[in-house]
Image (tube, rainbow, N blue to C red):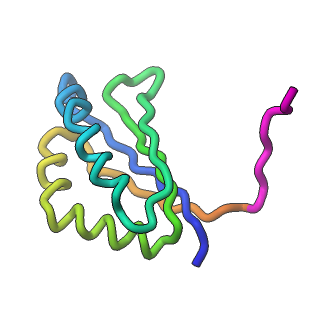
């Protein structure tokens, strides 16, 4: 199995992202305890404050797919869809075997 990087793009109806952001710490705490989870970060678009992307790292695509299915079954995406103007976009990426970091002093 290979590690994967997942992006979840969300486009909220105006004024609804704050509702989601207040719930996000609890959602992510549950995610943190999921088998195969590595890391996650949330980023708001610099020009469109109603767009958010979650960048996730997982040990494998299977681990992420299992997690995603559990979130669908739990109703999280049904509740989330009430706040969105577009369907969530999920992409799964594999490493291209190239990493560049800043020099260490």
Outermost residue to the bottom: 1
35 or 46: nearer the viewer: 35
Q: Which residue shows up at 33% across the image and 54% down it?
A: 31
Q: Which residue shows up at 45% across the image and 46% down it?
A: 40
Residue 102: give x, y in percent of width and height. 80, 33
Using residue 27 as the reference point, say whether residue 42 is left or right of it. Answer: right
Q: How many marks?
A: 0
Query: Where is the C terminus found, in terms of image quarters?
Result: top right
**Relative to 21, is 97 above or below?**
below
**Relative to 90, is 20 above or below?**
above
Magenta segment main secondary structure? loop
Q: Which residue shows up at 39% across the image and 45% down it?
A: 9
- Quadrant of residue 104 within the rendered picture: top right
- Quadrant of residue 36 within the rendered picture: bottom left
Q: Which residue shows up at 35% across the image and 23% down it?
A: 49
Q: Can residue 101 be found in the magenta stretch?
A: yes
Q: Can residue 62 be found in the magenta stretch?
A: no
Residue 69: give x, y in percent of width and height. 27, 70
105 or 17: nearer the viewer: 105
Residue 63: give x, y in percent of width and height. 42, 71
What span is colored magenta in the figure? 97-105
**Relative to 13, is 56 above or below?**
below
- Quadrant of residue 18 within the rendered picture: top left
16 or 27: nearer the viewer: 27
Query: Where is the N terminus found, in terms of image quarters?
Result: bottom right
**Relative to 54, is 4 above or below?**
below
Residue 97: give x, y in percent of width and height. 76, 61
Using residue 44 as the reference point, say whether residue 17 is left or right of it. Answer: left
């Amino acid at each position: 199995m290979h590690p994967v990087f997942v992006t979840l793009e969300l486009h909220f109806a105006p004024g609804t992202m704050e509702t989601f952001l207040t719930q996000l710490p609890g959602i992510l705490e549950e995610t943190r305890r999921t088998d195969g989870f590595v890391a996650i970060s949330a980023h708001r678009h610099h020009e469109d404050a109603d767009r958010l992307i979650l960048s996730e790292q997982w040990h494998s695509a299977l681990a992420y797919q299992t997690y995603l299915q559990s979130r669908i079954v739990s109703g999280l995406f049904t509740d989330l869809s009430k706040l969105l103007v577009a369907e969530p976009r999920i992409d799964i990426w594999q490493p291209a075997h190239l990493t560049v970091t800043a020099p260490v002093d």
